[in-house]
Image (cartoon, grey):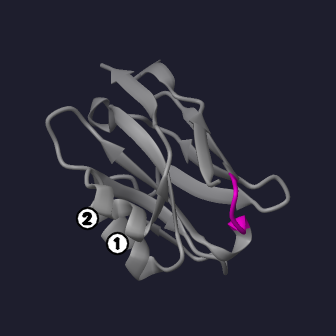
Amino acid sequence: QVQLVESGGGSVQAGGSLRLSCLASGFTFSTYVMGWFRQAPGKEPEGVATIDSDGSTTYADSVKDRFTISQDNAKNTLYLEMNSLKPEDTAMYYCAAARSKLAMTWLLKKFSSPESADFGYRGQGTQVTVSS
């Protein structure tokens, strides 16, 4: 049974930092594309960052140079280091896993639909709140 369990969220002031973690189980972690999504109240979910099995990374423009995605294959854990946080970073952050970058794209498109299970997995989320 696949599980993705996020932790590390919380409330911080603007300019602060947080590190999110995602403990994965039930699949071969090192072979999957891993990523972080976020969804703010009343907004569509958006992709934040991804990391491929070869270590290559992608970032949303809004978080480039502030956030860093990484993974520890020995611990089956995905991380998101978030620095210089802004109020607009406030959202629920979700860990995601997919077999390919294309599947990850579809997992985000189908985020709120039962169809998302056809493309990969996501966790229950951890809340990040940034106050000004």
Amino acid beneath label 1: Thr
- Is residue 62 something one can see in this rendering? yes
Residue at x 35%, y 61% (from the top left corner): 116
Taking the view exactly as shown, the residue that stands out farthest to the left is 42
Across and down, in percent, residue 98 comes to 51, 69
| Residue at image coords 43%, 28% | 127
**What stretch of residues is rendered in magenta?**
25-29
Q: Mark 2 points at which residue?
A: 109
Give the number of the disc on residue 105: 1
Question: Could you tell whether 107 is left or right of 66 in the image?
Answer: left
Residue 44 covered by magenta stretch: no
Residue 119 vs 95, above or below: the answer is: below
Local packing at callout 1 (Cα closer than 10 Å; few below 14, some 14-19, many 20+) is some
Whether label 1 touches label 2, CB < 8 Å: yes
Residue found at x 54% / y 32%: 17
* Structural crowding at the residue carrying mark 2, measured as other residues with C-alpha within 10 Å and reported as few (<14), some (14–19) or many (≥20): some
Q: Overall secondary structure of the magenta stretch?
A: loop
Looking at the rendered structure, the kind of residue marked 2 is Lys
**Mark 1 residue element:** helix
In the rendered view, does 63 fall on the left or right side of 120?
left
- Of helix, strand and loop, which one carries label 2? helix
Residue lying at 30% horizontally and 19% vertically, measured from the top left: 132
